[in-house]
Image (cartoon, grey):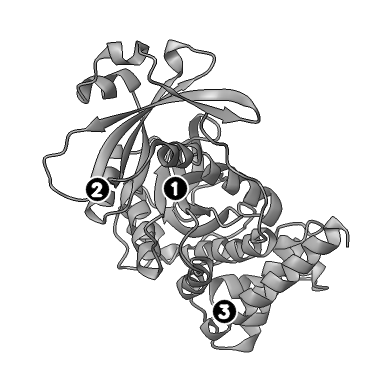
Amino acid sequence: MGADDHRLDTFELNFHKVADITASHFTRPEPRNRALQYVRALADPEVRKTANGIANSLGEKRADGLQRMLSSAAWDADAVRDALQAHLLGGSAGNVRVFGAAEYNFIKKGASSVGVGPQYSRRTGRLENCQTGLFVVQTGNGADLIADRELYLPEFWLKDKLKCCRTKIPHTVRYRSKEESIMAMMRRIKQIRWYCDDWFVCTEPLDGKQLATSLEHDEIPYVLQQPNCLQQLRMAGVSMDLLTRPSWTQWVEKGAVHSQWLRIRIPDSEVRPMRRWLLVERVLPRRSDKLRTYRCFGPEHTDLETLVAVALNGGSAARTLAAACESVGLDAYEVRQWPSWYRHITLAMLAHFCLNSAPATAQPAKPA
């Protein structure tokens, strides 16, 4: 069997799983069938990822049926997400799972689509007219899969009641910071199934203090990259002489030393089985501006190897989202309303699951 045949068989098996686990969340067969057609089309590399492109692939001249499924048909995108999460987070303990948070900026024209406005885009490094989606990606168990999603609504958007009404934002929606949205997703994940070996990682430039406080309150182990490395070290009371001592652990990737790491215990007045550390990375070749720091929180027995492995997973979420845009059209949508955005993103998550949930054989690098 060739690689393409194996990939096709894997997709079909996962597609049937998706059809089974989501069946009860559609009240009528017509929107369910439309949604499954949409998922299959999003995963098809030959199909143009637009409403008209997908409709044409189904032999339809107009996209009315698909647009109705995305906008007004009776089905619950959050319930479908929950069903996917329950399946995704299933299995048994024993494998380390890392949940990484990342934002993705969807560049848009005009200002009428939900959440669109002038916002800083990490993709381009400048202010753009865009939407900002927040995502949690699970790595481990052989695949990187999108586990949850939220649309970030800037405060200026929620103050415009007419726009909120036109885009069908529920009256119960209130402003949430990016950190609060990420915590809402992590709490959903923890409620479904959480194991003692699970970790959270984030390398985005967010309010690390607010996020760390919330994660510690929920006893979720984390590794958070911090800005201003030297300032973080001084705040932790670390002597700069420590950075020159031969106490660094080398990290080997593909037979070559990639980086060096140092773990420093942060004193904690609370008596609990969880501890805080400051993790310092020195990227090679050695340069003073290549120091990175990470705030860490986890079980007392956590070793340096685990913290480094989690920290190195920090970029996986952003890479997974970029790949999902290419493979399943995560960003290729033509919707303007709040329900339609969540429906498209949720169905793209299903398509991404169908394509990527096969076990992988790659092994993580080990410290020397």
Residue for point 88% across, 62% down: 1
CA separation in Å, label 1 and label 2: 22 Å
- Ranked by sequence position, the earlier of labels 3 and 1 is 3
- Residue 278: image x %, image y %? 30, 31
Residue 222 versus residue 23: which sits nearer the camera? 222
Labels 1 & 2 near each other (Cβ < 8 A): no
- Residue 227: image x %, image y %? 35, 27
Under circle 2, the secondary element is: strand
Under circle 1, the secondary element is: strand
Residue 64 in view, yes or no:
no
The disc labelled 3 sits on which kind of residue? Ile
**Disc 1 designates what residue?**
101
Examine the rendered structure and indicate whether residue 331 appears above or below residue 240. below
Query: Is 133 on the left-hand or right-hand side of 349?
Result: left
**Disc 3 designates what residue?**
21
CA separation in Å, label 3 and label 1: 25 Å
Residue 268 in view, yes or no:
yes
Examine the rendered structure and indicate whether residue 262 appears above or below residue 112. above
CA separation in Å, label 3 and label 2: 36 Å
Q: Quadrant of residue 52?
A: bottom right
Residue for point 40% across, 67% down: 193
- Residue 195: image x %, image y %? 39, 61
The disc labelled 2 sits on which kind of residue? Met
**Disc 2 designates what residue?**
274
Examine the rendered structure and indicate whether residue 107 appears above or below residue 161. above
